[in-house]
Image (spheres, rainbow, N blue to C red):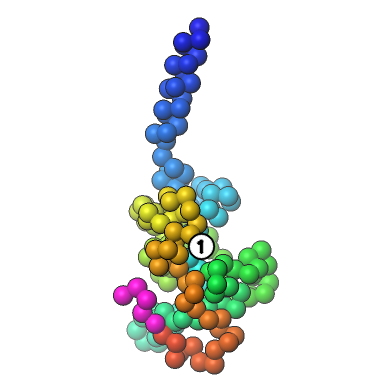
Amino acid sequence: MAAKSFVRRARRAAAAQQELPFWKRKTLAQMSKQEWESLCDGCGMCCVNKLEYEGTGELAQTDTCCKLLDPKTARCRDYKNRKKIVPDCIQLTPSVVAKMDWLPKTCGYRLVHFKQDLYWWHPLVSGDPETVHAAGISARGRVIPEDQVEDITERVVDWFA
């Protein structure tokens, strides 16, 4: 009897190891709140200001960020209340991700939406929230809050060309 129980447990363990992670099994809309939040790699790049040129619609990256983004951590200083403090903050949802072309090409939400793999440095893959910064993908240490800058049109950068 003990041998059958052991075999069953071993089979369950093997099946669990072969199961795909949630971001490969689910669409963005199917994710729980916890899964959704964990898909954020913590890069802060969605909070970095972009300029859209009239006529062409071309986007340009700046080295300025939302006043709530902490440049030292690349994290929102008041994530829970961000929409109250910054009314034009765009809250990511599955439908927003589907139509927003300004999200970084490396964004976990965007990658899952387009059925692509997360990068090795994504915390869900690496197991370490610091790898996104070590890989040079984040806004950490690169940005200045917009309320400390006079003219963001003079702050265009090309970090990932």
The magenta-colored residue range is 157-161
Residue 64 on the magenta span: no
Q: Position of residue 125 (x, y in %)?
A: 42, 50
- Element under label 1? loop
Q: Position of residue 57 (x, y in %)?
A: 38, 81
Where 68 sits versus 105, above or below? below
- Judged left or right of residue 16, residue 66 is right
Residue 149 position within the rendered picture, expressed as x and y whole percent measured from the top left = 54, 89
Badge 1 amino acid: Gly
Residue at point 37%, 76% (across, down):
159
Which residue lies at the image location 31% right of the left edge and 75% below the top edge? 161
* Residue 110 appears in view: yes
Q: Is residue 22 above or below residue 94?
A: above
- Residue 160 forms part of the magenta stretch: yes
Q: Can residue 27 be seen here?
A: no
Residue at horizontal 40%, vertical 57%? 121
Q: Is residue 14 left or right of residue 40?
A: left
Picture mark count: 1
Q: Which residue is denoted by mark 1 in the rendering?
A: 42
Q: Nearer the viewer, residue 47 or 51?
A: 47
